[in-house]
Image (cartoon, coloured by chain):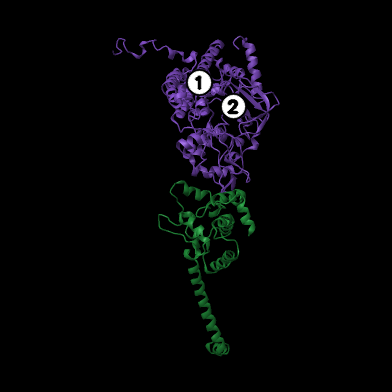
Chain colours: A green, B purple
């Protein structure tokens, strides 16, 4: 093919409307990329995540955790753990995460600390499933299995010899937020009792709160 | 029954063994009769692989234990049903941290049956109601966790998030109420994770709790001839023997286990440590006790002075529930069982005369101090001279120490042949307290009512010496050569 044959072909295709459309599309594409990048930047801040009162309960425990204050000064943000890496995956996570906003607006009163605590186990189970489905991908943003040496000599050997077929979250859960038992051994009745005692509710009030929703 | 012929006594003892022991028990530690295929959980190897790195100490202890050698692994003991209150997920398995007597009893059935309802298993339940008045009021709840409950056992609380409440755990107290409802803690005596027979046969197995002011049994044993010979002859104690029948597998000296649980001659071993005890010794007034064995395997101590329950009768247990009487062991039968141990090394007359010395001390404590002091306190309460609240008045502490500390020490000292504890650490202090603190305080509290509330309880037999102030004696060293003036 020569330049002379391409010229008329291109000339025929690149009519003014097409050029305008391409330019608009390109600009639109760039703009939407910029929008998404900025959107994720803004929505991945701890300030944004805790802008709903309901999320401040999760943040309280987080601020006491090693993921918030480590001696090295590395601090994992909400999104470092809970939003996937990469624009498309992050967009997907944020899209799915929008249901949290919908539930916040239309669902139970998560701003009530007792209601929040009653729902915490289900949130924990869902989060653990999420981590497991992704093979603990967000953990691995910072943690590299081969590099885990630990303070005790055995930590290295355990991570070398005992991790086949396991993903980080299989062993490492209840690290940051209020501890919740594994789904298999979780006892709803006992959890409800605990929440009732902590929040000064009458026996049976927890079950009623959950049923009202 | 000193007039019985030895053979008749032996037969009587055997009848008692049948009555009070688990059917089919032999004169040695029970062997687990299960097929080895019931243990060796497939996940056990994974536990060991990781724990030999993460907690090498406990893994090694297990590995070198009889359990380890027989292939009984972590999961065999720690496995749990997800519905268990204290079940938790751990590295893919559902486990429980606490291994309760019920768990151990999956294989050690005879030991579980004997342990159930024993004074050890009931050590928490028996005092649960009373503990707060001392531990919480006099000090604080923290002391229940670190003090009382470490020996008596805690009521383990599983929190709503599945964790064990640190106010109630770690705890290996012998009367621990476990999340599965069972009572006791095998590891109170059988140290984890080696569970060594030899270790449990040592007097030190009992020391953590049987020491201190109210039951200084460690110190008493050490100060007795038994303890003296034990130390000298420890190498001959055959402590690690598979079976440990006194008089057959060892003869050097007895340990706590020997007399209170051990097999001796034809007397079978028992995990009901109080079974051979005639008296209650840690009470304001000692009583000879019946051992009531219930149909459900539990047991009950009842004062022998009261009505003897009939077989089949319903009776209220310590926890308030009802049980049906299966058999009743009399104090005489219990003494007979203990006597069989003595007689592996001592003549019958010697053993029974020793018991008679012991009984006399208990009866002296009861008659001279325990009963009058209790009656005087009763008068002071009845006359509203004391508030019902314990320990808010000094005399309540005085009275408490009289029987709970000094009085218990004297009685234990006599029971196990430590002259120092029977006298200087025991009854001497009881007498000093009674005449030097208790009576003056009681008279001060009673004031004008002392003549009615206090004096009538001081009988001539025991307290008549006070009425002869002229009876001088050189004991104080006054007016004697070398004794001062």
Query: Between tags 1 and 2, which lies in front?
Result: 1
Q: Considering the numbered disc 2 on the image, is that residue within a helix, a strand or a loop?
A: loop
Q: Nearer the viewer, residue A210 or A155?
A: A210
Decide which of tag 1 and tag 2 comes sooner along the chain: 2
Structural distance between the alpha carbons of marks 1 and 2: 33 Å
Vertical comparison of B185 with B50: above or below: above
Residue B176 place in picture, x, y as percent: 56, 35
Residue A9 place in picture, x, y as percent: 57, 88
How dense is the environment of label 2, judged by Cα within 10 Å: few (below 14), some, or many (20 and up)? many
Residue A52 place in picture, x, y as percent: 52, 64
Q: Badge 1 is on which residue?
A: B372
Q: Nearer the viewer, residue B396 or B426?
A: B396
Which label is found at residue B83?
none
Res. A1 visible in picture: no
Q: Quadrant of residue B302?
A: top right
Q: Residue at x 51, y 77 (%)?
A: A31
Q: Nearer the viewer, residue B105 or B437?
A: B437
Q: Tell me if A55 is positioned left or right of B14 in this view.
A: left
Question: Mark 2, chain letter?
Answer: B
Residue, far right: B312
Q: Badge 2 is on which residue?
A: B272
Q: Residue at x 55, y 49 (%)?
A: A197
């Amino acid at each position: 093919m020569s330049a002379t044959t391409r010229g008329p072909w291109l000339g025929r295709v690149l009519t003014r409307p097409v050029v305008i459309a391409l330019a608009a599309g390109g600009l639109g594409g760039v703009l939407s990329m910029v929008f998404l990048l900025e959107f994720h930047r803004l929505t991945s801040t701890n300030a944004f995540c805790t802008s709903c009162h309901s999320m401040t309960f999760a943040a309280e425990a987080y601020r006491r955790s090693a993921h918030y204050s480590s001696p090295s000064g590395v601090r994992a943000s909400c999104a470092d753990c809970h939003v996937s890496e990469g624009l498309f995956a992050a967009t997907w996570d944020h899209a799915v995460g929008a249901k949290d906003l919908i539930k916040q607006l239309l669902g139970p009163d998560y701003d009530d600390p007792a209601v929040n605590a009653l729902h915490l186990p289900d949130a924990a189970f869902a989060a653990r499933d999420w981590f497991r489905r992704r093979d603990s991908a967000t953990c691995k943003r910072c943690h590299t299995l081969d590099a885990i040496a630990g303070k005790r000599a055995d930590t290295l050997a355990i991570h070398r010899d005992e991790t086949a077929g396991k993903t980080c979250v299989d062993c490492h859960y209840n690290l940051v937020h209020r501890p919740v038992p594994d789904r298999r051994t979780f006892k709803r009745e006992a959890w409800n009792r605990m929440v009732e005692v902590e929040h000064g509710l009458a026996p049976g009030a927890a079950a009623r709160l959950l049923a009202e929703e | 029954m000193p007039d019985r012929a030895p053979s008749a006594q032996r037969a009587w003892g055997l009848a008692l063994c049948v009555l009070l022991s688990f059917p089919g028990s032999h004169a040695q530690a029970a062997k687990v009769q299960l097929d080895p295929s019931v243990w060796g959980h497939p996940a056990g190897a994974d536990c060991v692989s990781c724990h030999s790195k993460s907690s090498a100490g406990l893994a090694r202890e297990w590995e070198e234990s009889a359990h380890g050698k027989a292939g009984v692994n972590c999961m065999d003991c720690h496995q749990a049903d997800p519905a268990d209150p204290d079940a938790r997920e751990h590295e893919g398995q559902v486990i429980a941290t606490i291994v309760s007597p019920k768990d151990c009893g999956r294989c050690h059935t005879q030991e579980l049956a004997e342990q159930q309802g024993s004074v050890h298993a009931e050590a928490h339940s028996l005092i649960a109601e009373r503990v707060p008045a001392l531990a919480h009021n006099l000090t604080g709840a923290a002391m229940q966790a670190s003090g009382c409950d470490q020996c008596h056992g805690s009521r383990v609380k599983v929190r709503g998030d599945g964790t064990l409440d640190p106010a109630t755990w770690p705890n290996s107290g012998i009367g621990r109420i476990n999340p599965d409802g069972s009572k006791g803690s095998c590891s109170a005596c059988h140290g984890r994770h080696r569970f060594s027979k030899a270790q449990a046969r040592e007097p030190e197995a009992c020391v953590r709790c049987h020491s201190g002011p109210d039951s200084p049994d460690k110190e008493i044993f050490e100060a007795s001839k038994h303890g003296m010979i034990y130390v000298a002859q420890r190498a001959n104690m055959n402590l690690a023997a598979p079976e440990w029948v006194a008089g057959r597998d060892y003869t050097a000296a007895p340990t706590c286990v020997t007399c209170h649980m051990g097999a001796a001659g034809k007397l079978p071993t028992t995990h009901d440590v109080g079974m051979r005890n005639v008296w209650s010794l840690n009470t304001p007034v000692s009583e000879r006790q019946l051992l009531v064995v219930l149909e459900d395997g539990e047991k009950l101590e009842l004062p022998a002075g009261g009505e003897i329950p009939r077989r089949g009768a319903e009776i209220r247990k310590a926890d308030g529930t009802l049980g049906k009487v299966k058999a009743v062991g009399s104090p005489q039968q219990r003494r007979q069982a203990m006597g069989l141990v003595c007689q592996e090394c001592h003549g019958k007359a010697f053993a029974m005369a020793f018991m008679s010395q012991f009984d006399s001390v208990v009866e002296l404590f009861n008659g001279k101090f325990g009963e009058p002091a209790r009656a005087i306190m009763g008068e002071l309460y009845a006359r509203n001279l004391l508030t019902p609240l314990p320990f808010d008045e000094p005399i309540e502490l005085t009275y408490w120490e009289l029987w709970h500390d000094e009085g218990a020490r004297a009685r234990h000292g006599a029971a196990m042949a430590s002259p120092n504890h029977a006298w200087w650490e025991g009854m001497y202090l009881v007498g000093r307290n009674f005449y030097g603190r208790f009576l003056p305080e009681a008279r001060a509290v009673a004031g004008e009512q002392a003549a009615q509330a206090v004096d009538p309880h001081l009988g001539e037999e025991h307290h008549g010496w006070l009425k002869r102030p002229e009876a001088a004696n050189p004991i104080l060293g006054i007016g004697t050569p070398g004794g001062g003036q």
